[in-house]
Amino acid sequence: MKLLSLLSTLPLIVALGVGCDSKPAGSAESEGGTNTVALFKEGKGVWFTDETKKLFGVEVAEVGEKPMRRRVEKTAQVYRAADDGGTASGIVRLTTNELASLSVGQSLRLSAGPNDASQFKGRLERLDIQTLPLFGEVEALIEFTDPNHRCSVGDFLTVSFDGESKPALVVPESALLTAADGSYVYTVNGTRLTRARVKAGAAANGLVAIEDGLYAGDSVAAKGVENLWLVELSALKGGTPCCPAPKKNSDK
């Protein structure tokens, strides 16, 4: 419902910024020397003014550094069910990047799926690096107790590992824009808010770690991100003019 409401206001937003004198996209209409609206220009972003903040609810935050505990969540497959009094085993494949914060013997949590509230504990038992050249991943053996015999051979489980706490660049979770082709933030670039691709990591306490794409001291839009994205989409698809186009002459 929120997105539908925002979409319904876009024609008005674009109409405010595109006058009947057909000024190019990226210029700002002015009245008495004051910009009345922020416009989008491809390759540069959204014009960043006080009016931008009011119109799109934009708030800015600085990229900081805080200790973050990285969480790795993967899918494991059960290959041995638990006997009476015994343990069950499963296999999960991990990238070398994921392994950097994990170690043999550490505890983990398992569940039947992301929406399953009931969890049970296990441990990372062994790593098989022989699979690395073949699959580009390391095969990890996990073991867990299953006294109620919930898991059968071939079942898939969601396994969560908590890595070591390390310093990381962080932004508010509300600053992250997740699109079909990846994650983005809007960075403050002079008088523009420019969309930049980032690699997001662990999230905790309203913050998300940024593993690539930002530097300490950068400033990003912490609120109003969805509004900026909708304005950008509208502009890239041609926008909505405030006055009708002249009719073509049908006479030949």
Image (spheres, rainbow, N blue to C red):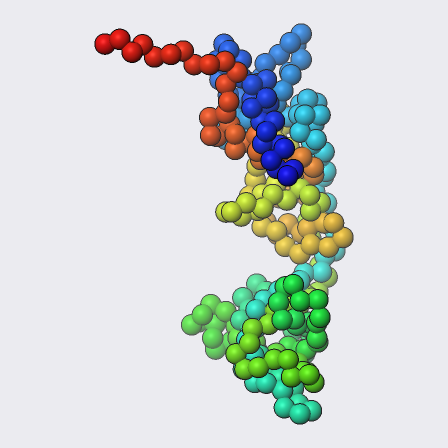
Which x, y percent locates residue 161? 66, 68
Residue 125 position by quadrant: bottom right
Which x, y percent locates residue 123? 67, 78
Give the quadrant of the C terminus. Answer: top left
Q: Camera-side residue: 250 or 195?
A: 250
Q: Is residue 30 above or below residue 177?
A: above
Which x, y percent locates residue 243? 50, 13
The answer to whether residue 78 of the structure is visible from this angle is yes
Residue 100 position by quadrant: bottom right
Residue extending furthest toward the right: 205
Give the quadrant of the N terminus. Answer: top right
Relative placement, left or right, of 165 versus 17 is right
Q: Residue at x 70, y 76 (%)?
A: 121
Which x, y percent locates residue 154? 52, 78
Residue extending furthest toward the left: 252
The answer to whether residue 194 of the structure is visible from this angle is no
Relative placement, left or right, of 143 versus 65 is left
Q: Residue at x 50, y 18 (%)?
A: 241
Q: Residue at x 67, y 51 (%)?
A: 209
Q: Is residue 51 above or below residue 114?
A: above
The number of numbered discs placed on residues in the rendered structure image is 0
Q: Is residue 243 above or below residue 145?
A: above
Q: Residue at x 56, y 73 (%)?
A: 156
